[in-house]
Image: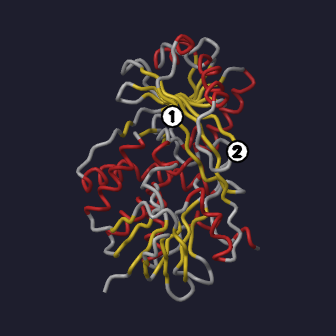
Amino acid sequence: MKEQILILGGGVIGLATAFELSRRDYDVTVVEKASCGGQASGAAAGMLAPFSEIGEDPDDFFQLCLDSLHLYPRWQREVKEASGLDFEYSESGSLHAVYHEAELLGLETRQAWQRQFGVEAEIITGDRLRQLEPDLSEQIIAAMHYPEESHLFAPDYVKALEAACRRHGVTIAEQLEQVTVERWREEIVLRSKSGRIFQGDRLIVCSGAWAQELEGVFDLRIPVYPIRGQICAYDLAVGRINHIVYTSQGYVVPKANGTLVNGASEDIAGFQTEVTKKGIDRLTNWNKNIFPFLQEMTPFHTWAGLRPATQDGFPLLGALLEAPHVIFATGHYRNGILLSPVTAKAVADILDGKQDYAPLASCRPERFSY
C-alpha cells in the first residue's frame, strides 16, 4: 500500500513537492485553505537569478539556489509534459548593473568567489554593454553579465504545476478556510473548518508566510514572517529589453507577453496584501535610472504578495528530529519559484531515505529552538 502524504499548503513549494512525490509513487493530498498559488507564488516576478541576488558569500543557501537553477531546464520540460500546459521559460541571461566606480570592486569580488562554482560571469562596460541593452541609462557604468540566469512566467508555471499534480493523481483540497493539525506525533490528522478530516502517514509543512501559526502545535520556534512585496508592470514592445536587469534598488524583467515587470518594494504590513501608493512610487521614482524611457510611461498593473521571510534568511527545510515523519519546507522568502525544483527533490529524497543533502545542514527546522 502506498504511503499517504499530506502537504499543508498549495503554493509553488507545496505543488512542486506534490508533483515530485507523485512521480515517486506516493499517494499525495495537498490541503490548501484558500486557492493554490494564490499568495506569493502567483504574484512573483519569476526570476531565476541566484548570482544577481546572492552576492555576499558562498553559503549553503547559495548552493541550494545554484543546484535548483541547474535543475530547471529539465524540470520545466517535465512540468510542461506532465501538465499539457505551456508557460514562458526564458534563458535570457541577466545584467547586474552598477552606477559608481566604487561598486566595481564589489562586482569583481562577487565574480571571483562565484567563479569557484563554475559560474559564467563577465563584467562588461561601454559600447559592449549598450550593444546588449541599447536603452540602458547612461548613469550605468558597468554590469555583470550572467548568461545562465533565467526567468519564467510565474502564474502560468503555478497553473501548470497544479495541472501536472492532478494528472498524476494528486488530490487537491482547496478553499478550506482554516486547517488545524489535530494529531502529528504518531499519525497525521488534519481538520478543516467545515470538519473535513485528512489522514496520512507523513506531513509536509509548506505553509509559507503562515507557518508561524504552527509554533504552538509543534512546540517549536518558527520565525517566518510575511514581507509584503509590491510590483508593477508596463506594456512594452517585445524585444525592446532582452535581459533581466538587476540593481541594488530593484529589477526589471521583460516578458514574452509584452509586459515589463518592475519590482519590488518591500515593507512589513502583517498579512495585508493591499497595494500602496508609497510602495509603487518607490518603483516608479527610480526605474528611470535603469531605463530613462520609463519616466514617460505609466504602469498598467500593480499587485502585491506576501513573502515568507525567516529570521536568518534560510528556509526551514528538513525532517523534525523527534518526528521524522513531519517535514518542513517553508520560509523561502523571495526565492520560492527558484527553489521549487530543489526543494521538491530534497523532500522526496528524505521520504525515500536517501543520503542527506549537504546544504540542508543550515536549514534544520529546529535550529531556532536550541
Q: Position of residue 100 (x, y in %)?
A: 71, 20
Q: Residues within 10 Å of mark 2 (few under 14, many from 20)?
A: few
Q: Give the mark nearer the N terminus: 2 vs 1.
A: 1
Q: Residues within 10 Å of mark 1 (few under 14, many from 20)?
A: many
Going by the numbered disc 2, the residue's amino acid type is Ile
Indicate the quadrant where residue 86 lies.
top left
Where is 283 relative to 25, above or below? above
Q: Is residue 173 left or right of residue 215?
A: left
Indicate the quadrant where residue 370 lies.
bottom right
Find numbered disc 1 in the image and state the secondary structure of the residue it sits on: strand
- In the foreground, 316 or 279: 279
Q: Is residue 96 left or right of residue 48?
A: right
Q: What residue sits 68% from the left and 37% below the top?
A: 109
Farthest residue, direction front: 194
Find numbered disc 2 in the image and state the secondary structure of the residue it sits on: loop
Q: Which residue is mark 1?
A: 146
Q: Which residue is mark 2?
A: 268
- The quarter of the image holding the N terminus is bottom left
Q: Position of residue 185 (x, y in %)?
A: 57, 86
Going by the numbered disc 1, the residue's amino acid type is Tyr
Q: Is residue 30 left or right of residue 363?
A: left
- In the foreground, 175 or 103: 175
Q: CA distance from mark 2 to mark 1?
A: 31 Å
Q: In the image, which is nearer the foreground, mark 2 or mark 1?
A: 2
Where is 43 relative to 287, above or below? below
- In the foreground, 74 or 296: 296
- The dot on residue 237 is none
Q: What residue sits 59% from the left and 35% below the top?
A: 275
Q: What residue sits 46% from the left and 26% below the top?
A: 260
Q: Position of residue 49 (x, y in %)?
A: 52, 41
